[in-house]
Image (cartoon, rainbow, N blue to C red):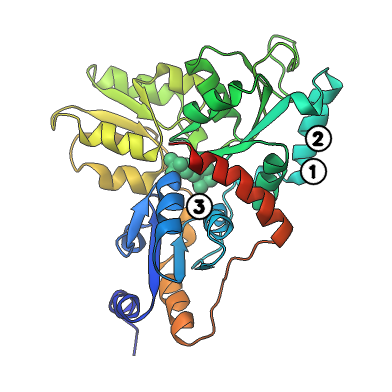
C-alpha cells in the first residue's frame, strides 16, 4: 500500500517536538508543510527562536548549517543536504587566496574586513569570523556593508560578485572582482572600496537584457523586479531589486492590473500572484538544489525521528562553529 506522505507528515508534525522550516524556493508541496517559511534571514532568526528540540530544514545545506551554528542545542535535520551551487564556489583555501591577493596589492590583513554572503559554508564563515568580519543576506547587505565601512577597512566580499557589485553601485562605492579585468585593468585593491570574489548564482544568471527588452517591447508599462544576485547590468535596467522577502512585498503591493516580470527563482514567482506576473526568462529558472527536496524526503526524515534513528543530521566541527558563530551573531545583532 502506498504512503500518503502529506497525511503522514501532518501526523508526525503533531506527535513530535519538531518545527518544519521551508525556504520560499522549495517545491509547492514541501513549502506548504512549513511551520515557518521565509527567506534566508527570516529563517535563520525564526529557527533560532523556535521552541522545539528538532528543526527539520527544507532548503540548501548552508541554511541548515547556519541554524546549527547559531543554535547548537538544537538537533537540525535536512530532508536533503543539497549544496547551493554558489556556496560551493568558495572554500577556506580560496578565501585565504583572496586575502593574499589583497595583501600582495598593498592591503595588510589587519586592514581587510571580510563580509560573506550567508550562501557559504561554515568553514568560510569561520574564516570571516576570525578576521572580525560578518555575514550578510540579500535582505540586510546594505546595512551590513554600511557597518563594515565604519571600520575604515577595505571590504572583501565573498562569494557573490553580483551582490557585492550591486550593493557597491547602490551605495556609490567602487568595486572590482578578483580575476576579472575591466578595459584591460585587473582588480585594484587600493582603488576599490569593495573587492569581490568571483562567485555567482547560476540560476540568477538566466536573466538577460534580451529578456528585459522582450517584455518592455511587448508590454510598455510592465515593471521589472529582480533579485540582487542578478548581473549588475540587469539590476541597473530593472525597476526594482530586492531580496526574496522584499520582492514578495513589492509585487504583492502592486495594483492587480499592473504587469510585472520577475527575475528570481521559479517556485517563488509561480506562487506569488496569479495574474499579471511573468517569469523574466525563456528558460525556467529553477534552483536545482532547492528542488531536490521532495515530500517523500521530508516524510523519511520525520519518520526517522519517530523511530529514534535520525538521518541527515547537520553537524559542524566545534572550532569551525565557534568562529562561524561570531560572524553570524554579528549579523543577527544588527537590527
Ligand atoms: P534570500 O536571502 O533572498 O532568501 O536568497 C537566498 C538565495 O539563495 C537566493 O538565491
Ligand atoms: Fe544557491 Fe542560486 Fe539556488 Fe540560491 S538560487 S540556493 S544562490 S544556487
> What residue is drawn where x is 65% and y is 19%?
152
Q: Nearer the viewer, mark 2 or mark 3?
A: 2
The image quarter containing residue 125 is top right
1 vs 3, front mark = 1
Where residue 283 is drawn, which disc sits there?
none
Residue at numbered disc 1: 93
Residue 119 showing in the rendered view: no
Residue shown at 41% from the left, 58% from the top: 49
- Say whether mark 3 is within 8 Å of ligand 2: yes
Question: Is 55 placed above or below 302 here?
Answer: above
Q: Which residue lies most toward the right here? A: 104
Q: Position of residue 67 (x, y in %)?
A: 52, 57
Q: Residue at 62% across / 46% down in the picture? A: 326
Q: Relative to the observer, which residue lies in front, 272 or 123? A: 123
- Is the residue under label 3 in contact with that under label 1 (CB below 8 Å)? no
Is 262 displayed left or right of 289 in the figure? Answer: left
Q: Nearer the viewer, residue 111 or 302?
A: 111
Q: Position of residue 285 (x, y in %)?
A: 43, 42
Instruction: Report crowding for label 2: few under 14, some 14 to 19, many 20 or more residues within 10 A (C-alpha).
Output: few
Query: Which element is circle 3 on?
Result: loop
Picture disc at residue 288? 3
C-beta proximity under 8 Å, tags 2 and 1: yes
- Check disc 2 and report the residue beneath it: 97
Disc 2 on helix, strand or loop? helix
Q: Please provide percent x and percent y for residue 185.
A: 74, 11
Amino acid at each position: 500500500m502506498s504512503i500518503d506522505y502529506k497525511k503522514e507528515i501532518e501526523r508526525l508534525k503533531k506527535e513530535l517536538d519538531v518545527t518544519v522550516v521551508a525556504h520560499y524556493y522549495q517545491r509547492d508541496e514541501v513549502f506548504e508543510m512549513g511551520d515557518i517559511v521565509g527567506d534566508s534571514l527570516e529563517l535563520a532568526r525564526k529557527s533560532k527562536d523556535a521552541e522545539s528540540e528538532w528543526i527539520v530544514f527544507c532548503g540548501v545545506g548552508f541554511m541548515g548549517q547556519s541554524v546549527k551554528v547559531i543554535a547548537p542545542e538544537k538537533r537540525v535535520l535536512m530532508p536533503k543536504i543539497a549544496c547551493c551551487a554558489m556556496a560551493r564556489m568558495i572554500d577556506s583555501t580560496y578565501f585565504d587566496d583572496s586575502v593574499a591577493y589583497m595583501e600582495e596589492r598593498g592591503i595588510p590583513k589587519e586592514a581587510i574586513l571580510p563580509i560573506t554572503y550567508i550562501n557559504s559554508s561554515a568553514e568560510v564563515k569561520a574564516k570571516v569570523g576570525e578576521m572580525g568580519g560578518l555575514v550578510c543576506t540579500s535582505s540586510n547587505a546594505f546595512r551590513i556593508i554600511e557597518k563594515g565601512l565604519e571600520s575604515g577597512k577595505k571590504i572583501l566580499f565573498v562569494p557573490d560578485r553580483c551582490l557585492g557589485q550591486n550593493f557597491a553601485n547602490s551605495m556609490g562605492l567602487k568595486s572590482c572582482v578578483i580575476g576579472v579585468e575591466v578595459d584591460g585593468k585587473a582588480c585594484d585593491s587600493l582603488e576599490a572600496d569593495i573587492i569581490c570574489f568571483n562567485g555567482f548564482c547560476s540560476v540568477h544568471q538566466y536573466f538577460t537584457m534580451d529578456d528585459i527588452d522582450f517584455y518592455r517591447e511587448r508590454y510598455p508599462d510592465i515593471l521589472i523586479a529582480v533579485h540582487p544576485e542578478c548581473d549588475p547590468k540587469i539590476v541597473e535596467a530593472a525597476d526594482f531589486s530586492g531580496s526574496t522577502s522584499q520582492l514578495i512585498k513589492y509585487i504583492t503591493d502592486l495594483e492587480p492590473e499592473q504587469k510585472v516580470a520577475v527575475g528570481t527563482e521559479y517556485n517563488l514567482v509561480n506562487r506569488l500572484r496569479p495574474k499579471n506576473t511573468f517569469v523574466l526568462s525563456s528558460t525556467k529558472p529553477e534552483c536545482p538544489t532547492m528542488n531536490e527536496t521532495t515530500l517523500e524526503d521530508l516524510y523519511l526524515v520525520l519518520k526517522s525521528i519517530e523511530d529514534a534513528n535520525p538521518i541527515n543530521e547537520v553537524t559542524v566541527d566545534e572550532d569551525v562553529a565557534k568562529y562561524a558563530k561570531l560572524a553570524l551573531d554579528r549579523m543577527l545583532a544588527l537590527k
